[in-house]
Image (tube, helix red, strand yellow):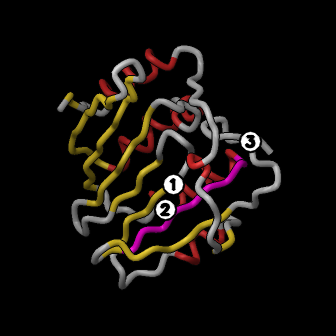
Amino acid sequence: MTMNPKSIEKKDAAPFFLIEKRGKDKRYTAWSGDLDQIKKLYGSLIDQFSEDIEILFKIKKEEKKTWENYYGKNNLSDLKRTIQKREEWFFCDGEVQISVKRIDTGEYLTFDEHGVLYLYADPSKNYAATFKAAGFQEEQEAAVFEEGHWHISPKDSEKYRADFLRELHLEKV
């Protein structure tokens, strides 16, 4: 098992997901200390998206306690190819978060700076089977960012971020 470096180590915490009603939407929240499991779930969820997407990429600016936001419309194939080229950075940079929105349904998937996945979904759709197939158990568990933690970024993160933004044509907003 490869530890999820975006979050604190929780040796006794099993991979979990929970479902919450958020206004008219459902929000699925998932976490695992196993990086390979997070990658598998992210891939399973993003593979269900249509080709036309919007991307919001955020970089945490600790000194200012703010986010630097980048946005663009793109296609799913380009996003998947760009992630695959720098997968270790993408899943390990604790100073970024990415949201990918389906243009056709408005559903979106966020992978945050703590290594937590959020899927904001149409309430008529049931994604629980996708989470379970990836080895996540449905339950209520404290989110990892509610405990003491730190943010770690891999070496050369700034270069990887710049390449990611350039290749996906994301503009600062």
Q: Are marks 1 and 2 in contact (CB under 8 Å)?
A: yes
Residue type beneath disc 3: Glu
State how far apart marks 2 and 3 are (Cα). 24 Å
Q: Residue at x 24, y 31 (%)?
A: 169
Q: Earlier in the sequence, mark 3 or mark 1?
A: 3
From the viewer's perspective, is the residue at label 2 or at label 3 nearer? 3
Residue type beneath disc 2: Leu
* Count of all numbered marks drawn on residues in the image: 3
Q: Which quadrant of the structure image shows residue 63?
A: top left
Check residue 28 for magenta coloring.
yes
Query: Which quarter of the image is occupied by the N terminus?
Result: top right
Q: Residue at x 30, y 33 (%)?
A: 168
Q: Earlier in the sequence, mark 2 or mark 3?
A: 3
Check residue 170 for magenta coloring.
no
**Which secondary structure lies at badge 2?**
helix
Name the residue furthest left. 173
Q: Position of residue 91 (x, y in %)?
A: 56, 38
Q: Is residue 56 left or right of residue 131?
A: left
**Which secondary structure lies at badge 3?**
loop
Q: Earlier in the sequence, mark 1 or mark 2?
A: 2
Q: Residue at x 20, y 30 (%)?
A: 171
Q: Position of residue 16 (x, y in %)?
A: 65, 64
Query: Which quarter of the image is occupied by the C terminus?
Result: top left
State how far apart marks 1 and 2 are (Cα). 10 Å
Q: Which quadrant of the structure image shows residue 165?
A: top left
Residue receiving disc 1: 117
Residue type beneath disc 1: Leu
Residue receiving disc 2: 45
Residue receiving disc 3: 9
Q: Position of residue 132 (x, y in %)?
A: 65, 72
First to last magenta residue range? 26-34
